[in-house]
Image: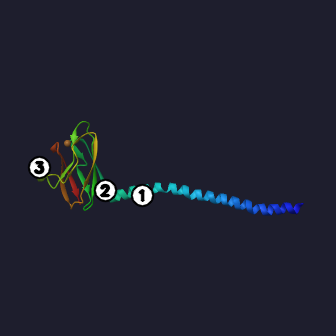
Amino acid sequence: MIRPKWLVLLVALPVLLFALGACSDDDEDDGPAATDVVEPLPTDAEMDDDMESDSLQIEVVSQSLSFSPDVIEAPEAVEVTIVYENAQDGVQHNLAIYMNEEDATNGVEPLAATAVAQGPDTQELTVGPLPAGDYFVWCQVHTSLMTATFSVE
Ligand SMILES: [Cu+2]
């Protein structure tokens, strides 16, 4: 009587273990799949890092008749994106970059310029790559009242 029970156990145990093993294999398959879902998050962060290195962003703000910073520094031979924020409520400004002040006063087209817009307003302006030098910046609404230097070095 004992022997048949042992025999049943001996036969049943491997089957049970196999079944359990199959179940735990499924769980392990779910495990890596779950981490696969988590992995794209660091990938997004890496993409942000890549965007920063590929396209340098420089923030410039106007809260009065001025640009802050009034010397906008950028590396030579690199395309940069100026994020220009007109933070002055109800006042129109823009950011226009010229080869020099003479061009600006003589009405030469700017190398790059945001659209004139009433604050609050934020625009992105892609500039360059430009050779090293000091470029002239003004607001086309307030011209000589509101100037800055775009310094590429
Ligand atoms: Cu202005």
Q: Residue at x 23, y 49 (%)?
A: 70
Q: Residue at x 11, y 53 (%)?
A: 102
The tag earlier along the polypeptide, 1 or 2, is 1
Identify residue type, mark 1: Glu
Give the side of residue 98 with respect to residue 46, left or right.
left
Q: Which mark is residue 112?
A: none
Local SS, label 3: loop
Q: Residue at x 77, y 60 (%)?
A: 12
**Between residues 41 and 104, which one lies in front from this camera angle?**
41
What is the CA distance from the residue labelled 3 to the residue labelled 1? 43 Å
Q: CA distance from mark 2 to mark 3?
A: 29 Å
Mark 3 and ligand 1: say if the CB distance to the nearest ligand atom is below 8 Å.
Answer: no
Q: Determine the residue located farthest toward the right in the rendered image.
A: 1
Q: Secondary structure at mark 2?
A: strand
The image position of residue 106, as x and y in percent, is: 9, 50
What residue type is disc 3 on? Gly
Disc 3: which residue? 107
Residue drawn at point x = 70 percent, y = 59 percent: 19
| Residue that carries the numbered disc 1 in the rendered image | 46
Name the residue type under label 2.
Leu
Image quadrant of ligand 1? top left
At label 3, counting other C-alpha atoms closer than 10 Å, the crowd grade (few under 14, some 14-19, many 20 or more) is few
Q: Which residue is mark 2?
A: 56
Q: Residue furthest top?
A: 90
> Which class describes the residues within 10 Å of circle 1: few (<14), some (14-19), or many (20+)?
few
Q: CA distance from mark 1 to mark 2?
A: 15 Å
Would residue 50 appear left or right of 84 to someone viewing this image?
right
User: Nearer the N terminus, badge 3 or badge 1?
Assistant: 1
User: x, y percentage for residue 41?
Assistant: 46, 54
